[in-house]
Image: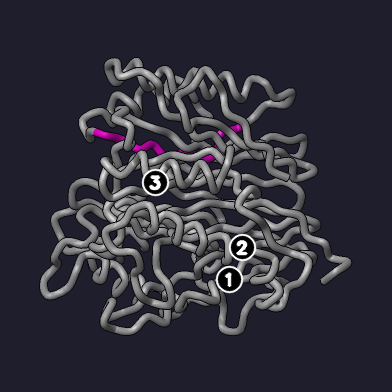
Amino acid sequence: MVIAETSSDLAEGTGCSHVDLGDSTRVALMITPRGRVPFGEQAREVLLAMRTVLGKYPEPMAITVQTVFLKDARDQAECEELFTTFSGADLPVTNYVLQPPCCGAALAMEAWAIGGKSVRVEHFGPQALAVAYDGVRWVYCAGVKPASSSRGVYPQTLDALGRLRAALEQAGSSFERVVRTWFYLGDITGPEGEAQRYQELNRARTDFYRDIRFHCSPSASNAAGGVYPASTGIGMVGHGLVASCMALETQRDDLFLLPLENPQQTPAYAYDSKYSSQSPKFSRAVALGLGDYVTTWVSGTASIVNAESRHLGDPERQTEQTIDNIERLIAPENFAQHGLKGAGASLHDLAKVRVYVKRAEDLAKCRAVCQRRFGAVPAIYAVAGICRPELLVEIEGVAFSRYARANA
């Protein structure tokens, strides 16, 4: 289902994936500028690359959600102005994240676009957008921040989650329908009172989720007690917090929503209190089956076996272990162990990956492993703190694969 492409016109590692979903086409773009010229020229290079790629499709392609990885916060205002001029009234919801591209560029961008005769896009202000097609309706919320970054992480997280809820409701959805979240937290392993900042985010997330039963459709086949979303909690420069999510509304009866756990990892929500007073409330992945295809969102994944960090100090072996974890997580054998035969994916079914690298000097080693294991899958490599001080690499992605219902 996934056709990955790279272009000689772009920097190494930049490319796109084309995913044919029948009545619609999705395109994932991962763009890092080649030049090291002033910021505005780098941003225009990104926009030109995006226009070139999307211009090849016969049907109009709408960009729905994008994440801009910035080296310097002072460039955000210029970036917003350029992107607004480029998109006009069709501006997608956007995360601006202070995660410098590992290669030294001033920015990099991940963007998702969709096209198809039945596709309809609705805008609900700068932070919420809905896409409807083929009996489903996706709601994307991005760029959500708490009112103030001067307070502690716990109240900031509750504030951001409340704002996500309000954005979802404005778009006609609810938090119960969320299947994927992202939390970008400044100084993620820094101290916060007697705890770490990420631990305080987990405490707030636990309290906010306490009365939520996650599901995307009354007719969906859900795990008992609901489903935690797939999620990424990752560091960024500064002390702020940026949150985003995606939710699904549908009444289709050929849908399943399946939370996936890795048989070689303790579920994050079951971690011992020594890692965090309240465990991280997310699934290792969430798989959504619609008709004859499966979309699998892979949460931020690191070099952890059972609950312990592995290969301390070795970025290459941590990268290998991380990819091993993803491969096992999305494999058909793991789907079967979760009670669903006929579904599953391989690494080459990934439409894109983000590779978060704690130390920029480890880029060459990490990228060599990723290119060998992922092949042509488009990737962005960004410098970011990981949720445990000893972890050097974290990877997330999304896979698209066929569902052989006859075998289920």
Q: Which colour scheme is used?
A: one colour
Give the quarter of the figure containing the C terminus: bottom right
Q: Is residue 355 left or right of residue 19?
A: left
Closer to viewer: mark 3 or mark 1: 3
Where disc 2 sits, the SS reads helix
Magenta region: 62-71
Q: Do the residues labelled 2 and 1 touch (CB within 8 Å)?
A: yes
In the rendered structure, which amino acid carries the disc numbered 3?
Cys
The amino acid beneath tag 2 is: Ile
Identity of the residue drawn at 72% across and 46% down: 133
Judged by depth in the image, the label closer to the viewer, 2 or 3, is: 3
Which amino acid type is shown beneath numbered disc 1? Answer: Leu
Query: Where in the figure is residue 305, as x and y percent of width and height?
Result: 43, 73
At which x and y percent is residue 376?
A: 58, 37
Q: Mark 2 points at which residue?
A: 330
Q: What element carries label 1?
A: strand
Viewer-nearest residue: 171 or 245: 245
- Looking at this view, is 222 or 232 the one in front? 232
Q: Dot 1 corresponds to which residue? A: 260
**Circle on res. 366:** 3
Q: Where is residue 27 in the image (x, y as percent from the top left)?
A: 62, 36
- Of helix, strand and loop, which mostly describes the magenta segment? strand
